[in-house]
Amino acid sequence: MSNEEMKSVAASCPNFYWKLFQSTFLISAFTVGGGFVIIPLLRAKYVDEYGWLTDKDTLNLVSIAQSMPGVVAVNASIILGYRMAGLAGTLTALAATILPPLITLSAISCAYSWFASNPYVRYALKGMQCGATALIVNVAIDLLQKQVKKKLLLPLAIIAGTFLANFFFDVNIMLLVIIDGIIGLLFLRDQKYSK
């Protein structure tokens, strides 16, 4: 979607700022385990439920958010808010994204010794890590299936090469992201890759 289309969607949505605040707050509250967990949450809320984004928009949003310094969830919310409603959308999404960690960290800091020594808290965190891993694997499989259905060799080769280089040869992930970006810039400009 273009910025104009996203702004028209936002303008036509009743209580847009409240929906943006509420959804971004919930996504931030449940983004446990790192930046990649945000992908299924963004997709469920903004693609499936609200229809504000397409799958491609979501992936582009996360890709840009990952390439910038800072937390992926905050970067993604800033980009989404700005694209949907300019500065007011940015500030709404930013406030909603930073409030859950701020509240959680404030509560934990008041009772840090209890949280640090409580085995039940550790067990709960381990369970949340497992759930986050499952969400990441689910998104990866879904994206891979979409690429396989397109039957385009180069994107599949990039996926396979990146996986092999990182998993078997321990190539630094940042180097792989840069290499993949250069490959995309040089070889994926054809319209058939944009679908």
Image: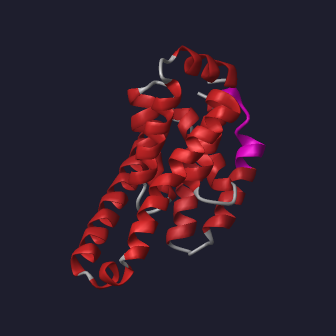
* Segment colored magenta: 183-191
- Give residue 132's position: percent from left, percent from top: 36, 58
- Give residue 4's position: percent from left, percent from top: 68, 19
Answer yes or no: is residue 101 visible.
Answer: yes
| Residue positioned most to the left | 120
From this view, report whether residue 154 is shown above or below residue 85: below
- Give residue 99's position: percent from left, percent from top: 49, 53
- Along the viewing direction, whichever of 123 and 43 lies nearer the viewer: 123
Magenta stretch: helix, strand or loop mostly: helix
Query: Image point 56% across, 41% down: which residue?
Result: 93
Colour scheme employed for the rendering of this structure: secondary structure
- Along the viewing direction, whichever of 189 and 131 lies nearer the viewer: 131
| Magenta region includes residue 190 | yes
Query: Image point 71% across, 31% down: which residue?
Result: 190
- Along the viewing direction, whichever of 155 and 92 lies nearer the viewer: 92
Residue 186 left/right relative to 19: right
- Give residue 107's position: percent from left, percent from top: 39, 67
| Magenta region includes residue 31 | no
Q: Quadrant of residue 7?
A: top right
